[in-house]
Image: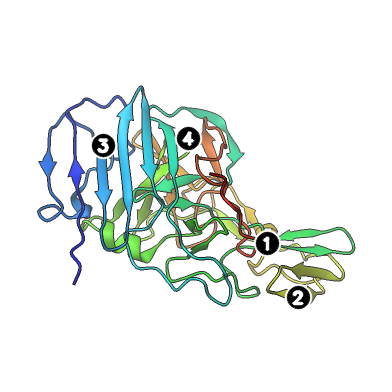
Amino acid sequence: MKITRHIISFLSLTLLYSCGFYSQKKNKVNATSESLSISKIDFTKEYQIDNDEFGTKTKVVIKNGNRIIRTNGLPNHPTGRFPNEGNPNSIKAQDLEYSLPLNPKLTGKSKWAREPGISVNGVKFEPETAERFVCETGEVYKIEAIQELVNLGLDFNNAHVQPSGAYHYHAISPELIKKLDNGKDIILVGYAKDGFPMYYSKSGKYKPSYVLSEKLRTGDVCNYNNPHQRMEKELNYTRPDGTFVSDWTYVKGLGQLDECNGIEIDGEYGYFITDEYPYVSRCLKGEFKESRPSGPPPRQHPHGRRQRRNH
């Protein structure tokens, strides 16, 4: 039986940024994986995860006002089998680096984000897909990852694999929560690209503000095509059921969370990953740049042709 090793080292420093709902203090801690569970790690500070069982290598350092995440993108928990019927790609180690601000700033406006954040284990959150139905009457319907019409090969972590080999979450990962569960209701699961923290509430304390639209769809002769699946549907006068992004509509004040699944508590803003739509934030409220990390460019389409990496 393999022994999973988590090597964690914390440097003595005073962090300028107070992570939402968590206080930060100057401390100095040295510990080994055998004596410290990953659920004990203070992810607001510098840390390192080296997991022999799953191959995870993630290191976070604080430098020049930024939280710098270097990772191979491999999860530190069990995954489903890949390739599978709905996803032809294999999980591969990546070479990724992200730089997130320690002192995030709210802009007062929401901005769509393709990859809104990164989990504490280095796996990215990418809630939407590139799959779509295109209708002869001009309508284009973006397909949600979590739906029952098209098999996108999601595993029990609500995740699958891009042609580059990048494993990514479309919603909360139950296996990740098992790893991080420290007995508290609210768990820090990652950081958004704008620097604000991302949380998950085991009790579902904070609810999103999205509902299914009451407006019937339009669209005649709508086709879905990829190298492994083809489908034709008549969408005209059909009722939204959550299959498509456009099936959902935001109702301000319906739940506690805003349009980006965020909320300000005790003066600190943060995002919540929820069990209900939108699952993971589709937009961000802080300043950020939607730039691709280093390494081979990831693609959302799980059925696209594999990309060769230039050496």
The secondary element bearing badge 1 is classed as: loop
Q: Badges 4 and 1: C-beta atoms under 8 Å apart?
A: no
Residue found at x 65% / y 55%? 249
Residue found at x 11% / y 40%? 30
Identify the mark nearer the N-term, 2 or 1.
Answer: 1
On screen, residue 108 above or below 74: above
Q: Which residue corresponds to mark 3?
A: 46
On screen, residue 292 above or below 208: above
Disc 4 crowd rating (10 Å Cα; few below 14, some 14-19, many 20+) is many
Identify the mark nearer the N-term, 4 or 3.
Answer: 3
| Colour convention | rainbow
Q: Which residue corresponds to mark 2?
A: 231
Given residues 106 and 291, the one toward you in this image is 291
In the rendered structure, find residue 131 and report the number of the disc placed on it: 1
Q: Which residue corresponds to mark 4?
A: 194
User: Please, what is the three-letter code of the amino acid marked with disc 3?
Assistant: Glu
